[in-house]
């Protein structure tokens, strides 16, 4: 039975705020709109390289570093003012926290720039990073080790989707370790041994925590972890056109990368695809640390979170100061929460989209085994069905192409690159057009992904056609999956001619993937027999 839902009230932006992560190597700011349901959406961002560690951490900030930091804050303030930001949340980490003149820098920021800085302790930094990863990566009840490798410190968070078992911050960031150890170029075996021994000493509390709650998974966030992932992705030929979030590689992938990379000199590192040139001089200390973590803790896989401290600052603000969308219950899953945030912001046609999704899933369940589809395919089809008409938010004309663009560029959380591509293209092909050679975005995809898209699009197209009027005329849909024919039996409130015409004119792709003819029959509602 198809059940219609009432529409949610429209959500609107109610506040614009900025979050600034004042790190050791860079100041990274994001500007977001806060919505009436408590969700948020990024408007813009700015990253300024400051390299506060030049001259050493735990000492005075040099005059040059001091000036670079203030100039970066001025640039960020100009951006915030241009967007009419109402509140700026600025959090300083180890470089400013430990500097002898860190307090002076904080006061100058207030007097000269108009930005008040909060210098947070390491455990708070770890907690905020944990919030960001919980929000942006699909986690379960099993623990994972979240690792954020910064310039001055490394944060370790052991936890799952709902709680943290251990929070720690260690002074072993890549800039700090490069300054302390001064490894040769190329790095020598002796340099590596010294680094490994130092890391071992610093990891005692993390080791004890993992002894109680073990895991085989690391979730990595921030620049060093993301840059390593980019290099591994380039080696493997993986696509990251849409997102680095949820990118996953195995320990075996890492060890192969490590063996080929660690002994390169600076000129050779410059040529490595995926390596940020700004990290060439201190990437090795991070590469050695990840190698230690994977081997010491028997880690099998690493996943990437593109959210880190700055998003954690926003989430803490929402949790503490605002009442918003509950991040528990059905919206604890970042995938579902992220999809519904996008739907509401694009003012989706809820009744129609839910109705189409229900019919699409009925078709899916009848064809799942025959088309070799999985539960993951079912989830993606459901979300693509909800999202298929969001292109109307831009324009009615070519709304299917607008849907493709929106889904690919919405920074949906919890999904891997291929999953976002599947949802975006299934939504794109819900109308008359089927995949063609001139569709460049489609033909760039791998063969298996293109096959999934064709199968799921074939289903969605017919389901969408069955609500051609957008008035949910079909009350019930049952499927007869015969040897050479697929029969769709529908019960309707009114005449079914428009629904049958709408579904049949878009049934070509379903015929192709099933190899069967499609027939739609109206069946009369059974009458109750009174006795």
Image (cartoon, rainbow, N blue to C red):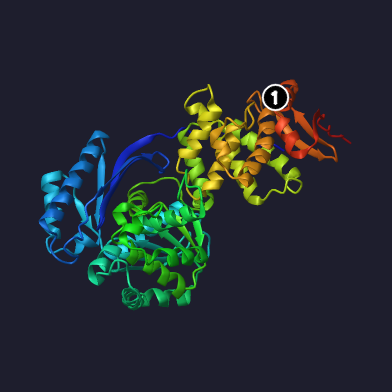
- Is 411 located above or below residue 208 in the figure? above
Q: Is residue 144 visible?
A: no
Q: Total marks drawn?
A: 1
Residue at image position (74%, 26%) is: 504
x and y percentages locating residue 4 in the rendered image? 63, 34
Left/right of residue 369 with respect to residue 381 in the rendered view: right
Left/right of residue 63 with respect to residue 31 in the rendered view: left
- Is 194 located above or below residue 352 in the figure? below
Q: Residues within 10 Å of mark 1 (few under 14, many from 20)?
A: many
Left/right of residue 489 with respect to residue 417 in the rendered view: right
Residue at image position (51%, 26%) is: 392
The quarter of the rendered structure image containing the C terminus is top right
Q: Is residue 147 visible?
A: yes
x and y percentages locating residue 114 in the rendered image? 16, 44
The quarter of the rendered structure image containing the N terminus is top right
Secondary structure at badge 1 equals: helix
Q: Which residue is mark 1?
A: 502
Q: Residue 228 occupies which quadrant of the picture?
A: bottom left
Nearer the observer, 217 or 107: 217
Nearer the observer, 521 or 70: 70
Q: Residue 82 occupies which quadrant of the picture?
A: top left
Nearer the observer, 133 or 452: 452
Residue at image position (49%, 39%) is: 408
x and y percentages locating residue 319 in the rendered image? 37, 51
Left/right of residue 297 with respect to residue 76 in the rendered view: right
- Is 249 located above or below residue 477 in the figure? below
x and y percentages locating residue 436 in the rendered image? 62, 31
């Amino acid at each position: 039975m198809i059940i219609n839902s009432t529409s949610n009230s429209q959500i609107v932006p109610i506040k614009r705020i900025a979050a600034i992560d004042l790190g050791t190597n860079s100041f990274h700011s994001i500007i977001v709109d806060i919505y009436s349901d408590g969700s948020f959406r990024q408007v813009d961002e700015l990253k300024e390289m400051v390299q506060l560690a030049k001259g050493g951490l735990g000492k005075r900030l040099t005059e040059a570093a001091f000036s670079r930091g203030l100039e970066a804050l001025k640039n960020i303030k100009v951006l915030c003012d241009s967007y009419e930001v109402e509140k700026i949340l600025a959090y300083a980490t180890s470089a400013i926290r430990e500097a002898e003149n860190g307090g002076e820098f904080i006061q100058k920021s207030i007097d000269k720039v108009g930005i008040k800085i909060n210098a947070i302790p390491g455990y708070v930094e770890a907690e905020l990073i944990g919030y960001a990863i919980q929000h942006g990566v699909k986690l379960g009840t099993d623990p994972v080790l979240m690792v954020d490798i910064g310039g001055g410190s490394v944060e370790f968070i052991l936890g799952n989707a709902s709680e943290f078992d251990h929070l720690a911050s260690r002074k072993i960031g890549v800039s700090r370790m490069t300054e302390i150890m001064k490894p040769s170029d190329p790095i020598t075996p002796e340099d590596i041994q010294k680094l490994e021994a130092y890391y071992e000493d610093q990891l005692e509390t993390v080791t004890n925590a993992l002894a109680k709650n073990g895991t085989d998974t690391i979730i990595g966030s921030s620049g060093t972890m993301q840059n390593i992932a980019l290099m591994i992705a380039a080696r493997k030929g993986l696509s990251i056109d849409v997102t680095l979030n949820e990118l996953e590689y195995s320990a075996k992938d890492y060890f192969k990368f490590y063996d080929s990379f660690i002994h390169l000199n600076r000129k050779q590192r410059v040529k490595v695809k995926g390596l940020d040139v700004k990290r060439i001089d201190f990437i090795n200390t991070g590469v050695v640390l990840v190698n230690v973590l994977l081997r010491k803790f028997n880690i099998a896989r690493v996943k990437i979170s593109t959210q880190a401290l700055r998003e954690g600052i926003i989430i803490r603000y929402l949790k503490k100061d605002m009442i918003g969308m509950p991040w528990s219950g059905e919206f604890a899953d970042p995938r579902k929460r992220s999809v519904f945030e996008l739907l509401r912001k694009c003012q989706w046609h809820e009744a129609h989209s839910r109705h189409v999704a229900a019919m699409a899933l009925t078709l899916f369940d009848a064809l799942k085994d025959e088309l070799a589809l999985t539960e993951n395919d079912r989830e993606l089809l459901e979300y693509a069905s909800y999202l298929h008409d969001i292109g109307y938010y831009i324009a009615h004309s070519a709304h299917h192409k607008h849907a493709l663009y929106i889904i690919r560029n919405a920074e949906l959380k919890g999904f891997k690159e291929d999953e976002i591509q599947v949802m975006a293209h299934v939504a794109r092909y819900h109308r008359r057009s089927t995949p063609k050679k001139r569709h460049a975005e489609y033909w760039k995809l791998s063969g298996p992904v293109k096959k999934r898209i064709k199968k799921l699009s074939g289903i969605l197209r017919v389901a969408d056609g069955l609500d051609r009027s957008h008035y949910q005329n079909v009350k019930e849909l049952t499927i007869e999956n015969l040897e050479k024919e697929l029969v769709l039996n529908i019960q309707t409130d009114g005449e079914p001619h428009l629904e049958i015409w709408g579904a049949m004119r878009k049934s070509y792709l379903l015929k192709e993937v099933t190899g069967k003819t499609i027939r739609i029959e109206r069946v009369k509602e059974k009458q109750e027999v009174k006795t």
